[in-house]
Structures are given as structure tokens and as C-alpha cells.
Amino acid sequence: MNLEEKLKKQQYKEIWQQYCGFLDLSMNGYMKIQRRLMEEQVKLWSNCGLGQSILKGKHPQNLDEFRKMVPLTTYDDYADILLAKQPDMLPGNPVIWIQTTWEGGKHPIKVAPYTRSMLDTYRNNVTACLILSTSKEKGSFDVAATDKFLYALAPLPFATGLFPLALGEEIGIEFLPAVKEAVNMSFSERNKLGFKMAMKKDLGFFFGLGSVAYAVSLSLSSLTNGGGVKLSSLMQCKPHMILRLLQAKRRCKKENRAMLPKDLFHLKGFMVAGTDNLCYKDDLEELWGIRPMELFAGTEPSIMGTETWTRKGMYFFPDTAFYEFITEKDMMRNYEDPSYIPPTYLMDEVRPGEKYELVFTILKGGAFARYRCGDMYRCVGLENREDETRIPRFEYVDRVPWIIDIAGFTRISENGIRSVIALSKLPIINWVATKEYNEQNRPYLHMYVELERDALLNTAMSTNILKDLLSTYFKYIDQDYRDLKKILGMDPLQVTIFTCGTFEAYEKKTGKKIHQMSPSHYELKELLDIQESMNRVR
């Protein structure tokens, strides 16, 4: 029986227990599920061609041996087999392959196989997210088959394309516009049609990347305030929507402000995924009148976890993946010295306040084992009286320092930046790149560069020219970077030119080279202080 059938029978307690019961687990109960599913995965993965390509003849018999014998992995360890889509080499039979960008300038795409069991788990956990997004307290929710869902998701083969398909197996919620139509539309076309349909049918749910949800929200506001609702269209709307529009116009005129989405639509549930959600949550809440619920999601693991009605930390689903954690200190030591093997800690070993790099093994016949996905999380607590949980909860921090992700779109690496500089043939001899935030708390990539001494451009012109040229080549090697401008209207790059000799002076003063990717606050401050003192001397 799926969700829709249980709703018809008013089996509300059973629904909550089936989909959200993981929130009632004790730490011991949570780890029992983790270990039981992992013991099954150890056998499947260790005996397949993919597993043996990494284990090289070893055969772990239990979880402890698996953690000792299987090294920490990255996509490079799987690329040859997965990109060739060789199902006979995998621990489970893939029924669908999900795709995303790998690394601009070096690798165009990476793919991840999903088994039927993985999709069943995904379906259950997506439904849990839908339910929790409407919840005000434990056991309460408000979901109906007649609800309408604004479509703001990338289609298959991207991971978000699974969402409407999986949800459709549980409940007949209508997407606006319909998925089969939306996938063939541009971002702007989808927004306009979705808004027109929402005005006719109302709207209950919204899900997208935080940055995309914000762009869609602004688009809806502009359509409303720019005369997007015509009299001829109003005649096709439901009476309560016409009344709501008239009341909204009156209220906004009285308060002397532009109309916002919350004036027209009263969302039951609002979900966001991706990076940099913290930059958009407050603005999204102001626009819609409801605080977005954040999800953990990714191409390799699918949906990993969710916030609850408290919006005070996210919980990992125990049946999606087996989780291990590397402390920030050990992660950085491994970055400095690749020969150092960082220890990992399990879910029942994490500590509040500590930042961790996530490592996971996908369950249910998944391909990835002890996989470093490149995401960092902070443990914010081991239990929570507000939602009566006794398992750890986390908040997303950012990508690992050697990857700069802007608004959930880009994965800018050191290799990517080197490729851009090489292709552009710009006279850049030293550089650092970091993620910074503007006055509106929006993220951008800031490059601090040093040019060859005989570069003849004056500083003011050089900055503009460098920025334009670098942007051109970032767009050339990275489709996602192009989409930042096309979809979000963002210009994600800022360039600062340093005086010749700044980096050399830094090395003399500190005795070491600065990290090129995401240098620490103290490193960057030292570099900027040296630059400032050199300018004063000039």
C-alpha cells in the first residue's frame, strides 16, 4: 500500500511510523540498522569486479575487516568501470544511471548507478521529506493527493529528476508544469508556465536548490508585479485564487510594497537542497512566509537526510548509506601529507561542535565504498528535546577546502583554475582562490593574482580585462559556471591584482607557500597585510 492509499484509509499513525519512524531510534537502534545493512553490502561489494579492482584479492568477512582493507576512495577509483557502464562488474544490477559534472577542465561528467533496492529506499525517504516539510510537531503532517508542486528541478539524468518519478509511485501530486513538458522548456519558460498554472490551481509544495528556488521566487514576484496576471487569465482561475489576488493587491498597496509569493500562495511544504542554502534561507522565508526545510542530497548517495519541523539540524537516514566521518584536523593533515591515512569515526562516535568530512558506503548494492564525496558537516547535537530525537544531527558547512562550490552549481578545483589560466595565456604567475560573500550574503569566487613584471596593462584596466577573460574561459570549460549567469543571473568572479613580489614576500615572512585553494582566514589576512605594506612603500 502506498502513501495515497494509506491517506484514503486515514492511517496517519502508520504513515508516520513507516516514513518518519527513524526519528524515534535510539543510538543503539540506529547503529544496529547501519551494521546489519552494511554486513549485507560487504558481501555484495567485496565479491564483485568493482570491489576486487580496489581490494586487489582481499576478501573482508565483516565490517571491521572491510574498514581496514578498503582504502578511502574518490571517483578516480571507479571512473574506468562506471563511465563504461559495465553492469556485470557491479555489486547490484543498475536500473538507472544518474549523471552530474565531475571536474571542469579535466573530466566532463561522472555517473552513478542505482539499483532497484536503492530506488525503493530513495522513494521512502523522499516521501519522508515531503511529510516532514509540512509537519509542525511529531506525528503531524498535511499531505493530499490533490496537492500541487511547483517544478524547479533539473530533469534526468540529474539526480533531482528522480524526485517526481519516485514521489509519483507514492502519491499522485501534480507538478506544475507536468514533468514531461517541463524537461523540454527553458528555465524562464518553465517559471512562467508554472506560475500561470499555479494561479489557476493554487500551490502546495516547492523544492529546488536554494539558489534556484531564490531565482524562481524573484521571477514569480516580477511576473506578479509586472502585470503578469491578465484579466483573461483570471477568468480561468479558481474563485479563491481570484479573491486571494485581489486581497493581496489591496494589502500590498496599503503597506506600500511589492507583492510577494506568500501573498498569493500558502505553501504546505518548502524544501531546499544543495550548497549555500544558509545564504538564501532567510530571504526565502521572507518571500514565501515559510522557512525552507533543508535536505542532504547528492548524485552518488541520492537523498541522505533531512531537517525536521524544528529546522535545527539534519538527520541522516540509516538505510541510505553507512556513514564514516573524518575530523577537520585529520582531513587537513591528509591534504598536506597524502601519505597520512586519516582515521574515521562512526555515527555513534561523533562529537557536538566538531566539523567532519563525510565518507560513505552506499547500501543496497551501491557502487561506492568508503567514498569521499567532498562535503563537510558540523555535528550540532547528539539529541534534541524539541523533536525528541536521540541521534546526532548535523548542519552542512561547505565543500572540502580544495573544491570551491558556488550556489550549488560549480565545483571549481585547482586543476580547473590551472586549465583556465593555461588556456587564457594570461601573464599570471601566482594566485590564490577563495570563496567569499558580498553584502547581500551571496557567494562568489575571489581570485587574488600576481602578474609578470613586464605586464603592461594598467591596474584598473587589468582587473576588468582579467575578470572578463577568466570568466570567458571558466564558462568554456564548465557548463555549470555558464548556468550561474544564465539561470541565476550571478557574476560569480571577482579579481584582485597584487603587487609584484607579494607572494615571494609572504614565503620569506612565513617560511611556507600559501594554500592556493581556500587559504585559511589567517593566511589570507597575512597575504593582504603584506600586499598593503608593499603598496605603502610604493
Image (spheres, grey):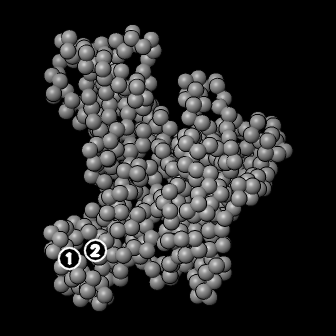
For image coordinates 36% across by 75% down, the residue present is 266
Residue labelled with disc 1: 251
Closer to the chain start, of discs 1 and 2, is 1
- Circle 2 crowding by C-alpha within 10 Å: few under 14, some 14–19, many from 20: some
* Image location (x, y in percent) of residue 384: 59, 57
* Disc 2, SS: helix
Depth check, front residue: 70 or 34: 34
Which quarter of the rendered picture does the C terminus lie within? top left
Residue labelled with disc 2: 263
Q: Amino acid at mark 2?
A: Asp
* Image location (x, y in percent) of residue 427: 28, 21
Q: Say whether residue 183 is left or right of residue 62.
A: left
For image coordinates 81% across by 37% down, the residue present is 58
For image coordinates 39% across by 67% down, the residue present is 290
Depth check, front residue: 277 or 60: 277
Say whether marks 1 and 2 touch (CB < 8 Å).
Answer: yes
Check the image and name the residue furthest to the front. Answer: 385
